[in-house]
Amino acid sequence: MCLNDFSQGVIIAEIVLYALFGVVQLVQGFFPGGHRKVEASYIVLSLVAKVLLGTILFANVMFT
Amino acid sequence: MYSRKNPSSSSSAYQRLPTSLLQWMVLDKDQHSHQPTGTDPIPSIYPNLNDTSHSPAQQPQQPQQQPQHVVQMGGGSSAPANVHNIAPAAPASVHRDADDDSKQGMPSVSCLFSLSNTKIKVLNRIAFTVHLAMCGVAIYGRYRNSGGQGQQGFKLKYDRVHLVGKGKAPNGSAAAFATSPFVQLASPYYPATTTSASLNASSAQASQSLSETCGAAVPNVLEFAGSQNFTMEMWTYPKKSGLEVDLGWCVAAFFLLSFLFQMSLELIGASGLNESFQYDKMFDGTMASDAQDEFSMKKAFAMRDARLVKPHMLRRLHFNWWRFVEYSASGSLVLITIAFLAGIMDVELIVCMFVLAATCMLLGIVAEFALRARLVLEKTVEYCRKNTEPSILDRDLSRSKEEQNPLQVLEPVLKDIYAKLSYCFWVSHLLGWVCIIVPWAIVVLHYMAWWSPCSADTLNLSREMLNRMLNRSATAADALDTAANPDTTRKPPDFVMVGFFVSLVLLMVHVLIDASCA
């Protein structure tokens, strides 16, 4: 089994999502306030990052 | 929405106070942490401020007004030209509604989604419910793969990496295959490798079949009789490092961690054990200003000591630091799960990557703390500019004109604190980027070196690599050295260790700076 097919997508997607965490804080540094939007962004980003990784692993590794 | 105070409440009460009584009250140390009550000379303007059940959604909606004076302490002199001209009944910010976010500088596109505390709470509950469900699916998948026995689970298995090189050996030359130097050239970011190789020389002039296979530490030397084309094939395997990876447990673990942390946020916030976990405090506490701020600022003005404002700043410095603690555990676990997928099985490297990722997340706490403290400082000064009564000091004709304006006296100090907080934020933020870029760079480079040959039939070897392979003595020597020191092949790359320790040093420097700011 070669993991090349889906692991490439996982790595790229997770890098983008991890970078967005920093981007959210960067925007917060330039534009103070908006605490609710920042909190919602963190919750959604965390959820998407983990569910994406879990779903891809489930689909390609664990349930195949 | 801003809750407006009654213009005739505190300010007028202040004006009625005799100057001597005010000065006695301000200078009294026992009053420093005293909560203003209804009988205090300074009445509580916003008695519901500390009421945790008090949310903006429950507030009667009032017309929103922007503050008349926005303090920009980091952007040069923005002090009002004359604080005496500020109306004493200027509105103060106590509770901010969702619509306030768009007024505070966030992009206007985000105004499409109006968020309230209730929506954030619901979103958090949805998140930890999904995390719990995914954790259950991961555990089910693990046991399903193990045939219901629950003993083996799914473990990563790597296919061999097949590298093919082509070249032309000159007449009378010799090719020596030392697998470890080859791997160091082809995949420098994968030290834990076992390699085998074979050489095929095909030529009409070839007197013998030059097909050999060598092990990991045995150089294979082939003599070329005449100029011959040759192909070289190489397979590499992960070296057994003693690390067994069970992806099922990895996935289940980071989902379970996220569920536990986010649920504990709800429970601790509801129980009242920590005010920072309550959404009302988390989102509105920072933006609030009340009579205690006015009281502490007046005391700071009278004492000419900006440090007296600190307890009141810290009192309203609420932010969700628990989120970053969760990320330091679950986010780092996600990262090393992806590292496993990329083929990294080296224990030391995995530990370094986990620590770096966790450090990045924990630096987020420092950055957020600096941001919130900066915001509290702005709001407190803004509030006091609108509500401080300089007319009381004006009566003291013995004071100079500068002393009559207390904000002018304290403003350089407050600006200095503001600048230090900004510095803390940027240092920790940029340091966090470094700490997260390094492990991701390792994953990407390793992935490119390890998995890319899966889809490549031919690897065009560089001239340097060919020369090295065709140099018998150097290649053989390298191979023998590597074989004599097999442990050196399992150490993480030097730049990882350098980056790790540099990050630690910078973190220590940052902590020292932060401590000096405090």
Image (cartoon, rainbow, N blue to C red):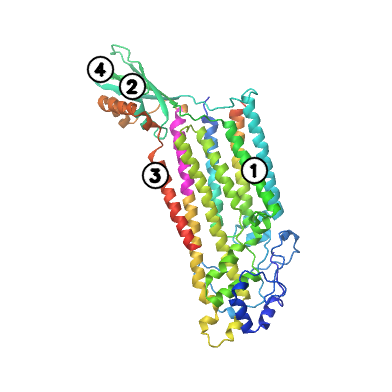
- Which residue in the protein does label 4 denote? B226
- Which residue in the protein does label 2 denote? B218
- B196 in relation to B293, above or below: above
- Which residue in the protein does label 3 denote? B498
Residue nearest the viewer, comparing B174 with B417: B417
Disc 4 crowd rating (10 Å Cα; few below 14, some 14-19, many 20+) is some
Image x and y of residue A52, in percent: 60, 38
Write down the chain letter for disc 4.
B
The mark nearer the N terminus, 1 or 2, is 2
Quadrant in the rendering for residue B487? top left
Which of label 4 and label 2 is nearer to you? 2
The mark nearer the N terminus, 4 or 2, is 2
Secondary structure category for the residue under label 4: loop
Magenta-drawn stretch contains B441: yes
- Give the Cα distance between marks 1 and 4: 70 Å
Residue nearest the viewer, comparing B247 with B203: B247
- B32 in relation to B142, above or below: below
Disc 1 crowd rating (10 Å Cα; few below 14, some 14-19, many 20+) is some
Left or right, B281 with reference to B448: right
